[in-house]
Amino acid sequence: IRPSLLLGRRIVLHCHELDSLLSSTLDRYRLEDYYPRVKLVACSTAVRQQLADYTGVAPLRISTITSAIDFDRLSSLSLESAPIRRGDILKVGTCGTADRRKGVDLWLQVVRILKDEAGVPIEFVWVGERKNADLDTLAEEFKVTDVVTFLGEVDNLEATRNSETLGL
């Protein structure tokens, strides 16, 4: 995340974890000095409060999006966007353990909507350990295998993240 921020990329950090899972997850990112430049989004009021306590960001500056992901709302919460030129491929990436607990099914729903409605060539990449062998089957169910890649763990996460247009 930090290299993407240093390159001027927009980062939306959507948190689902509570308690020690929240702190241990955020500790891995080492973003102490960067939280003001990251758009923080929580999946519930409880997560928002714990996220505020952990990051020092005022709760009113942390958005809450419950249940399913509303891409338009999430997109509007991102930092100022860089223009996408005609012919560019919009590459949307995310990282984390790829399993249902992390919302991979909701992510694939968003992928399906954007694939159909984006109006530009678009690719989606999920970087992180594959907890479920059924991810490819799930992608087939959503009819998005042509635009989704589950990379698994990578040696050079920075290079992968720097190739993205938008990081979620």
Image (cartoon, rainbow, N blue to C red):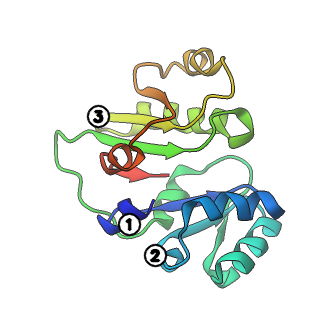
Q: Amino acid at mark 3?
A: Pro
Q: Position of residue 6 (x, y in %)?
A: 33, 68
| C-alpha gap between disc 2 and disc 1 | 8 Å
Can residue 18 be seen here? The reply is no
Nearer the observer, 121 or 157: 157
User: What residue is shown at x 48% (from left), y 75% (from top)?
Assistant: 34
Q: Is residue 9 left or right of residue 36?
A: left
**Secondary structure at numbered mark 1:** helix
Q: Is residue 143 left or right of residue 102?
A: left
Image height of 16 relative to 90, above or below: below
Q: Position of residue 111 (x, y in %)?
A: 50, 35
**Circle 2 sits on which residue?**
37
**Circle 1 sits on which residue?**
5
- Image marks 2 and 1: residues in contact by CB distance under 8 Å: yes
Q: Amino acid at mark 1?
A: Leu
**Secondary structure at numbered mark 3:** loop
| C-alpha gap between disc 1 and disc 3 | 24 Å
* Residue found at the very far front of the displayed protein: 155
Looking at the rendered structure, which numbered label has been put on residue 121?
3
Callout 1: few (<14), some (14-19), or many (20+) C-alpha neighbours within 10 Å? some
User: What residue is shown at x 55% (from left), y 37% (from top)?
Assistant: 128
Within the image, what quadrant is residue 9 found in? bottom left
User: What residue is shown at x 31% (from left), y 42% (from top)?
Assistant: 90
Q: Is residue 35 left or right of residue 91?
A: right
Within the image, what quadrant is residue 17 found in? bottom right
Q: Amino acid at mark 2?
A: Arg
Closer to the camera: disc 1 or disc 3? Answer: 1
Callout 3: few (<14), some (14-19), or many (20+) C-alpha neighbours within 10 Å? some
Q: Earlier in the sequence, mark 2 or mark 1?
A: 1
Image height of 148 relative to 137, above or below: below
Q: Earlier in the sequence, mark 1 or mark 3?
A: 1
User: What residue is shown at x 72% (from left), y 55% (from top)?
Assistant: 16
